[in-house]
Image (cartoon, helix red, strand yellow):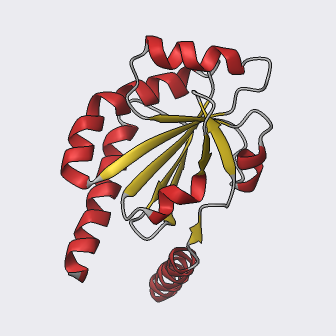
Amino acid sequence: MKKYLITVLVLFFTLNTIAQNNNSSLSSLPEITLKNIDGKDVKLSDYGANQKITVISFWATWCKPCIKELKNMNVLLEDWVDNYNMELVAISLDDSRNAAKVKPTVNALNWDFDVLLDPNGELQRAMNVANPPVTFLVNQSGHIVYTHTGYVEGDEYDLEDHIKELVLEESLKL
C-alpha cells in the first residue's frame, strides 16, 4: 500500500511540474502576413498586440467539423465579444485551388469575424498545425495559452471556460 501511495504521489508531482513548465513556456503569434477574404494584408501578430483575448481557429471549406465548430462559435460570438473583450479569427487552410470557395462559404454562413487565407500553409507550418480543426487561445498579452485539436459538439463551451479564466486572471492583476 505504501509503494502504491508513493508511486501515485511521485506521478502527481511529476505531472504537475510538466504542466507548470508547459505553461511557463508560452509562445507568441508568428510575424506572418496573410490576406483576408477581401484581399487586404493582415499581420497575424497584430491580433496579439491589441490587448484583447483572441481565438484563432484553423479550418477549411472541406472540413465538416471545422464548419460546425465555427458555426457554433459564431452563435456565441456576440456575447463573447461583449462579455470578454475578445475576437475570433478563422484561418482558412484551403490551398490555391480551393481558396475561391472561402469567401462564398463565409458569406453564406453569415460569419461575423475575420477570416484570413493561408493557401501556401506558411502559418500552418509556423504554428505546427497538422489537420484542422485546431483552435488556439491567445491571452491579452499576445501569448498562446491553450490549444485544442479536433471538434466535438460542446467544445465551444470548454473554450469559453478558458476565456473566462483569462478574464479572471486579468482582473486579479488590476
Please tell me whether residue 7 is drawn above or below residue 102 in the rendered image.
Answer: below
Rendered residue at 72%/45% (across/down): 124
User: Quadrant of the rendered structure where residue 121 is?
Assistant: top right
Is 158 placed left or right of 145 in the picture? left
Q: Which image quarter holds the N terminus? A: bottom left
Is 80 placed left or right of 72 in the picture? left
Rendered residue at 38%/47% (across/down): 87
Q: Where does residue 44 sit, x and y in percent of width and height?
A: 59, 53
Please tell me whether residue 71 is drawn above or below residue 26 in the rendered image.
Answer: above
Please tell me whether residue 149 is drawn above or below residue 105 in the rendered image.
Answer: below
Rendered residue at 46%/55% (across/down): 137
Rendered residue at 39%/18% (across/down): 110
Q: Where does residue 155 sit, x and y in percent of width and height?
A: 39, 39
Query: Can residue 63 be seen?
Result: yes
Q: Where does residue 19 sit, x and y in percent of width and height?
A: 52, 75
Instruction: Name the residue nearer the viewer: 106 or 6.
Output: 106
Question: Given the current orientation, which residue lies at the most extreme front position?
Answer: 40
Query: Can residue 146 be seen?
Result: no
Count of numbered circles in the view: 0
User: Quadrant of the rendered structure where residue 51 is?
Assistant: bottom left
Please tell me whether residue 6 is drawn above or below residue 143 in the rendered image.
Answer: below
Q: Which image quarter holds the C terminus? A: bottom left
Q: Where does residue 68 sit, x and y in percent of width and height?
A: 45, 23
